[in-house]
Amino acid sequence: MYRDNTKVIKIGNQCIGGGNPVLIQSMTNTKTEDVCATVKQIQQLTNAGCQIIRCAVPTMEAAKALSEIKKQITIPLVADIHFDYKLAIAAIENGADKIRINPGNIGGKEKIMAVVKAAKEKNIPIRVGVNSGSLEKEIIEKYNGVTAEGIVESALDKVRMIEECDYYNIVISIKSSDVLMCIKTHELISKKTNYPLHVGITESGTAFSGSIKSSIGLGIILNSGIGDTIRVSLTTDPIEEIRAAKLILRTLGLKKGGIEVVSCPTCGRTQIDLIALANSVEKLVDNYDLDIKVAVMGCVVNGPGEAREADIGVAGGIGEGLIFKHGKILKKVPENMLLEELKKELDAWKDS
């Protein structure tokens, strides 16, 4: 698999590439200059399962804020830079564990060399990022539009700019909001380089549409053995990005731990508010790092029998429900106590 043969790159206290686990990344939406708000959000994302965090650095004040932010977080910090090479250098000087740049938009060769020199002194990786929306005019003309081949050529051109400065501590990120184009782009570039790849469907949309597009795109790419870090880019609370990313990785067998929730669709037999219960169970299990399956079923027909493979579950009745374990009924409780009783069983499982 491509992933097993990528170059190992160290980002803070994490290593990616070379068969290391695929790591989950997100990005803060606070003003980076606001240290308290940014640290608070990073800590919340860390607790949710985020393993690498990226912060926008649009000002010198934001670059300087990284120093204080770094003191209060436990995961690697990536500085996102556009246009101003001085901000990239300042971010490095203030403790960024990695910088994200597009060498094509931060100035000429001398400015690129200055950024690489600063990164080399600290031995921090440079993530070379190219999106379908940032392709050069000449590449668009060459390929008669935005194409996967053009994105790959542009990205590798930017990589060569870094390599020409005698630096090879590189991560590549190539993204498109077009899912099929994004898949093809990663298939092409994986045959041309062994640098680790950060994978995502950019501008994928809201929590609903973005999760579906990201699941399809990331699922196909990752299942092909491509990708070393991922971000599910959603127009919503970044916590939802982490939840979606964890589920994608668990579904593909690339992440262990965390409870998998299965639930049946509602039908005319359903006698309880199954939708509300299933949503509440999903939120509840986020607090547990148990490697088990929990079923939420709407009736006894789809209860202990059909969900026998689940480790523990609930099945609804008329104003009441069953708590079952490995297909065997443990107890019958009122509907308004189902969540509480499930929590007790999960707590007991955790402590066993």
Image (cartoon, grey):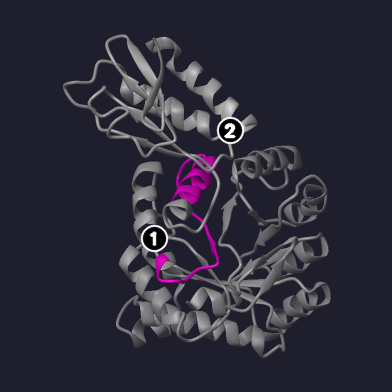
Identify the residue position indicated by label 1 in the image. Answer: 219
Mark 2, secondary structure of its residue: loop
Q: Considering only vertical position in the picture, is 34 above or below 284?
A: below
Residue 285: x and y, percent?
51, 33
Q: Nearer the viewer, residue 195 or 254?
A: 254
The answer for how far apart the CA atoms under marks 2 and 1 are is 25 Å
* Residue at 58% in and 35% down: 288
Q: Residue furthest left?
A: 268
**Which of the image's four quarters has the C terminus?**
top right
| Disc 2 crowd, CA 10 A, few/some/many (<14, 14-19, 20+) | few
Closer to the N terminus: mark 2 or mark 1?
A: 1
Residue 138 located left or right of residue 158: left
Q: Is residue 246 magenta?
A: yes
Residue 283: x and y, percent?
49, 30
Q: Residue furthest front?
A: 328
Q: Considering only vertical position in the picture, is 303 above or below 105?
A: above
* Residue at 65% in and 75% down: 8
The disc at residue 52 is none
Q: Is residue 100 magenta?
A: no
Q: Considering only vertical position in the picture, is 19 above or below 253?
A: below
Mark 1, secondary structure of its residue: helix
What amino acid is found at the position of numbered circle 2 in the picture? Asn
Residue 50 located left or right of residue 230: right
Q: Which residues are magenta?
A: 223-247
Q: Nearer the viewer, residue 197 or 206?
A: 197
* Residue at 34% in and 50% down: 212
Identify the residue position indicated by label 2 in the image. Answer: 287
Q: Are marks 2 and 1 in contact (CB under 8 Å)?
A: no
Q: Considering only vertical position in the picture, is 31 above or below 188?
A: above
Residue 339: x and y, percent?
46, 19
Residue 154: x and y, percent?
48, 81
What amino acid is found at the position of numbered circle 1 in the picture? Gly
